[in-house]
Amino acid sequence: MNKKYFQDIWADEMSYCFGCGRNNDQGLRIKSYWDGDEAICIWTPEEHHKAAENVLCGGIIATLIDCHCLNTVTATIAKKEGREKDDQIIFPYATGSIHIDLLKATPLNSPVELRAKVTKILEKKIFVKCSLFSKGIECVRGEIVAVKVPENFWKKGSSN
């Protein structure tokens, strides 16, 4: 099956983020896609992502959840507006808050799976819950609140 990754349709100026930017060669370069009403991301950590021996760094975990959730928000908006097949889409939202519960150490030696779902949509805020699993075990729960931003927020040289 050919998956349509959210990150592949974002505008070029949106694609330099450390977590999800396809144009950031040193970034995590996550790939998110739909599975029903959940957004899925499978990502494989590398040795330099460790916090301790065979433990994934909490900062990397926060970045994974932040980027996967924000991409879920934008893909949700694109889906609602019938723009899923467009390219060069601009994110209309940014992370306003993030909360993460580290339930157990996340092993470094296997891929992680993130599952995110939009839980509430308001006029200027969207709420998303996400869980991170390793080997089928939930290691982290997170939630972001995405806030609507001005159209030029992501443009180069913008002084927002």
Image: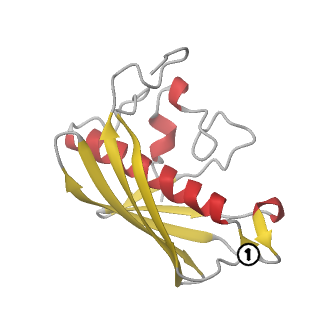
Which residue is painted at 34% across and 46% down in the image? 146
Residue 130: image x %, image y %? 41, 66
Which residue is painted at 71% across and 64% down in the image? 45
Which residue is painted at 46% across and 33% down in the image? 10
Which residue is painted at 40% across and 28% down in the image? 90
The amino acid on which the numbered mark 1 sits, given as a three-letter code, is Val
Specify whether 44 is left or right of 158: right
Q: Secondary structure at mark 1?
A: strand
Specify whether 134 is left or right of 110: left
**Displayed quadrant of residue 23:** top right
**Nearer to me, 121 or 36:** 121
Specify whether 113 is left or right of 142: right
Residue farthest toward the top in the current orientation of the protein:
157
Q: Residues within 10 Å of mark 1 (few under 14, many from 20)?
A: some
Would residue 133 be seen by someone viewing this image from the given angle?
A: yes
**Displayed quadrant of residue 88:** top left
Quadrant position of the C terminus in the picture: top left
**Nearer to me, 53 or 118:** 53
What is the basis of the colouring in this image? Answer: secondary structure
Count every numbered label the image shows and give the total. Answer: 1
Q: Is residue 77 above or below residue 136?
A: above
Residue 1: image x %, image y %? 48, 60
Q: Is residue 110 above or below residue 15?
A: below
Q: Which residue is mark 1?
A: 55
Q: Is residue 23 above or below residue 18?
A: above
Residue 118: image x %, image y %? 29, 58
Specify whether 21 is left or right of 153: right
**Nearer to me, 72 or 50:** 50
Would residue 2 be seen by someone viewing this image from the given angle?
A: no
Residue farthest toward the left in the current orientation of the protein:
123
Residue 60: image x %, image y %? 65, 59
